[in-house]
Image (cartoon, grey):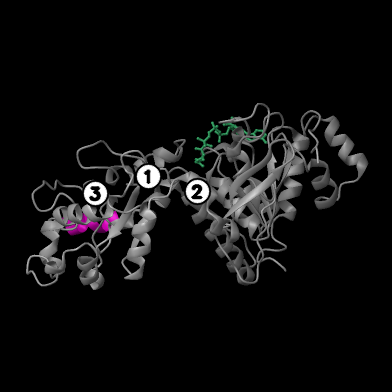
Amino acid sequence: MSKALDGVKILDFTHVQSGPTCTQLLAWLGADVIKVERPGGGDITRGQLRDIPDVDSLYFTMLNHNKRSITIDARNPQGKAVIEALMKTCDVMVENFAPGALDRMGFTWERIQQINPRIILASVKGFGPGPYEDCKVYENVAQCAGGSASTTGFDDGPPLVTGAQIGDSGTGLHLALGIVSALFQRVTTGRGQKVLCAMQDGVLNLCRVKLRDQQRLAHGPLTEFPQYPGGEFGEAVPRAGNASGGGQPGWILKCKGWETDPNAYIYFIAQAPVWEAICDVIGKPEWKTDPDYAKPPARLPRLKAIFDTIEQWTMTKTKFEAMDILNKYDIPCGPILSMKEIAEEQSLRATGTVVEVDHPTRGKYLTVGNPIKMSDSASDVRRSPLLGEHTDEVLRDVLRFDEKRIAAIKASGALGGPMRAAAE
Ligand code: COA
């Protein structure tokens, strides 16, 4: 089966998480992604959070599937020439260096356009133009600056960051969409363009419901928040704990075993259309006609007491038993799944969402496969490359350099020291 992005060549100058997320997605969709790494250590994540000595970390392997790796010293004149040759043949160049780093390498947008006017230059930066545009940014900085941290957590606690990597992986996702759109536009214009995704913007886009709430606040308290009706609402959207954020009230409730299992909980949504079923399931049929409970507006000031009562019922069931019962009545709910449970979930293995991959130095490990399923574009997950594993292959097969030229480039030191070979 062919793949959606067959024939698209990506010059991947990305590192850490945001950029690699983007290029991994494009690789899964069929693009030929050639990752340029600095000779010596390569992408810094190869050595970060290592669980096995001298083996590429899971941090690296899980973000760089289906790519080829070439080592090039971008400061060496011969190395620069190789990068320029790659720019000529590639459709897209993706980078997430600190602001100004690409210019300092000599690759300004003007220069890149001279080399290849059809190329798309896609960048992740921490901030867009403005007071912080020169700042280096990591995940949690973006979560804080994009409005996520101030709106996450409980009202009586400090701001919280979330485990979902909305700054890095979220921005990588946005960038991938920008790249595919630019490729589509190039079909008619014939020109490349710059695509920029700032992490602050990406996080804010994912927090748009909180900017919605900021404006609602001007017209009165946020009635679905746990602070309502007794608590204080200040000038800015407060932290909403586990409230749903949508039009249907929700909360996380304890289930059987919660005393010893930190994940014995269920997310319960008291959706209006199934309110009567909820009343029957939890043994409160009188609430169906009680004017204090029968209609959604009457329930809003009583949400805490309502969820406390529902919890008395959920605590008598495991989260999976509760799911089975609630699903029969179409009551929206979800178990709090641990990473262990997700890793062991066979249905996720069956769909390729969780995949086991074999790696020549690490052995077998689990990764998250392509979450985008397409009926006419197969998505296989191939292991991440070893550092510089494809240097010779790319020079020979992509750039069509002859052996003499490759030898001269190597002799110049542009590709670094001896390459590690795959032990496959
Ligand atoms: N050959 C030679 N030099 C290379 C090279 C290569 N193949 N690849 C990278 N370098 C150089 C760069 O040119 C840069 O040099 P300079 O600053 O002296 O000009 C240097 O390596 C380091 O790049 P930098 O991006 O500054 O790395 P860092 O580790 O200091 O910062 C980040 C990391 C993530 C904070 C920073 O890259 C950043 O803010 N990126 C944008 C936002 C982002 O994506 N953040 C999320 C990351 S998950």
**Secondary structure beneath label 3:** loop
In the displayed structure image, the side of residue 250 where residue 406 appears, left or right: right
Quick one: 151 or 308, which is closer to the camera? Answer: 308
**Dot 2 corresponds to which residue?**
169
Residue 388, relative to residue 88: is it above or below?
above
x then y, percent, for residue 145: 35, 42
Q: Residue furthest right?
A: 404
x then y, percent, for residue 294: 12, 70
x then y, percent, for residue 314: 27, 54
Q: How crowded is mark 2: few (under 14 residues within 10 Å), some or many (20 or more)?
A: many
User: Quarter of the image containing the C terminus?
Assistant: top right
x then y, percent, for residue 372: 55, 62
Which of disc 3 and disc 2 is earlier in sequence? 2
**Dot 3 corresponds to which residue?**
240
Q: How crowded is mark 3: few (under 14 residues within 10 Å), some or many (20 or more)?
A: some
Instruction: State yes or no: discs 1 and 2 in contact (Cβ < 8 Å).
Output: no
Q: Which residue lies furthest to the top in this view?
A: 53
In the displayed structure image, the side of residue 253 where residue 348 appears, left or right: right
**Can residue 128 be found in the magenta stretch?**
no
